[in-house]
Amino acid sequence: MLHSFRAAVVAARRQEALYFAPLLSEERILEAFGNARWLWQGWVYTPAITVWVFLSQCLSMDHSCREAVARLVAWRVARGQRPCSADPGAYCIARDELPESTCHQLVCQTGMALEHEAPSEWLWHARRVRVIDGSTITMPDTAANQAEYPQMAAQEPGCGFPIARIVVVFSLAVGTVLEAAIGPYQGKQTGENSLFRTLYDCLEEGDVVLEDRYFSGWFDIALPQARGVDVVVRKHQLRATDFRRGRRLGKDDHLVRWPKPQRPRWMSPELSATLPEELVLREVRVRVTQKGFRTKQLFVVTTLLDGQEYSADEIAELYRRRWQAELNLRSLKTVLQMDHLRCKTPHRVRNEFWMHLLAYNLIRRAMALAAFETGLEPWQISFKGALQTLHHFLFLFSFSPNVDATCEAWVRCMAAHIVGDRPDRYEPRVRKRRPKEYDLMTKPRCEYKQQIAK
């Protein structure tokens, strides 16, 4: 891996490409753009430059267009080129022209490519595990954003933010985003499981899907299974569990049959007819013995029925790793500050969403490279530490006189930031830092300003 990265750095320096080129080559960007790349002929902001600058904006602390353009100006001056205008207007126009399909494609390509390069030791039973989880993001309160992603109904007009629901498919082996969906927070077919159904094409036969109990419905298990995909999911709390029934495989481990429920409205009769009349599933009780944990036991349902090949302890340990999806979303929303996007139109919001996922995948690629070279696994390396290290080494890749020494130092620096192994850690759900003592907004801002003016 390190050898291929050195070669990418050398090729980027030879082509005088921007600092992100070793992680995302210009050829890959142009391939994703297809014929649309000719829209930028003769501009400073070519397709590759626009994507690279957008990535630097997503990785910066304040996410401003002005800082992203300033980094481009500094790079051009350091290369002995003529500086472009520091006014971000031209960059904003070029960024607005980015096709959403291209940004989406780059995310899927980078995520899948890294997973296919992963060594077999990082896989689970030589199988690829996809971890599914959902969350929400907000955006500026503009009329265009409100029309497509309305704020919560309980909030007064002008007092809330447009909100969107997202569902992300992560690779358990390398942590990259393989696919994602974004939609309104409320309305018909806007739930996390509904959004995930639109992403089934990213699943391949032999994959294992790891989910929380929101995805534990009968059809949410049957549809992936019909594609040859196995499911490991926490059982919904409203379903009864009785280990005295079914075929016993071991202590707190048995096979049961779930009959097919009535066809839901969103499903066509033709699709429903292709599904079996009942599902044979395996239920495993997981007992939590660590002190301080609120949950004392939980039930995991899976289509992995072979108790010899997949023991109950392995199933329990795999479900525990589902927490990686929560940590990955925290990296996206907190570390990369994707919890509140900044664009004022839905098209730009979606592009900003995809570019954050793309930046996340590139950081994950750097983490996987460092883990491979040092005998670790990607999840053992700190995401924030990798981001901080990458932020300072990007410019060095373009100007360092010794490429080999720079790449070696970069890898060793990232690998030094090991995530603490704290399996029994627990914390109270309280906050020490007090918020500012301001009243909550209960009416539109314009009415407050009129009141002050009087």
Image (cartoon, grey):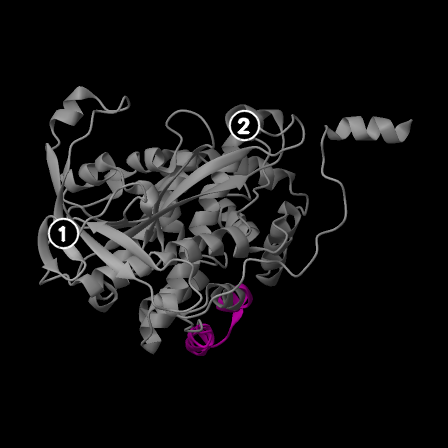
Q: Label 2: how many residues lie within 10 Å, few (<14), some (14-19) or many (20+)? A: many
Classify residue 414 by image quadrant.
Answer: bottom left
Relative placement, left or right, of 389 versus 143 is left
Q: Is residue 87 among what the camera can see?
A: yes
Amino acid type, label 2: Pro
Question: Element type at marker 1?
Answer: loop
Report if residue 159 lies within the magenta region.
Answer: no
Magenta residues (range): 391-418
Relative placement, left or right, of 48 versus 64 is left
Judging depth in this view, the residue of 141 and 27 nearest the camera is 141
Q: Indicate whether 40 appears above or below 65.
A: above
Eye-nearest disc, 2 or 1? 1
> Which disc is residue 150 wearing?
2
Residue occupying the point 24% across, 57% down: 285
Q: Indicate whether 220 appears above or below 360.
A: above
Question: Element type at marker 2?
Answer: loop
Amino acid type, label 1: Arg
Instruction: Provide the residue designation for mark 1.
Output: 244
Where is residue 199? Give x, y as percent. 30, 38
Q: Of callouts 2 and 1, which one flags the residue occurring earlier in the amino acid sequence?
A: 2
Residue occupying the point 40% across, 30% down: 190
Residue occupying the point 10% across, 48% down: 246
Judging depth in this view, the residue of 219 and 2 nearest the camera is 219
Where is residue 449? Give x, y as percent. 82, 30
Q: Label 1: how many residues lie within 10 Å, few (<14), some (14-19) or many (20+)? A: few
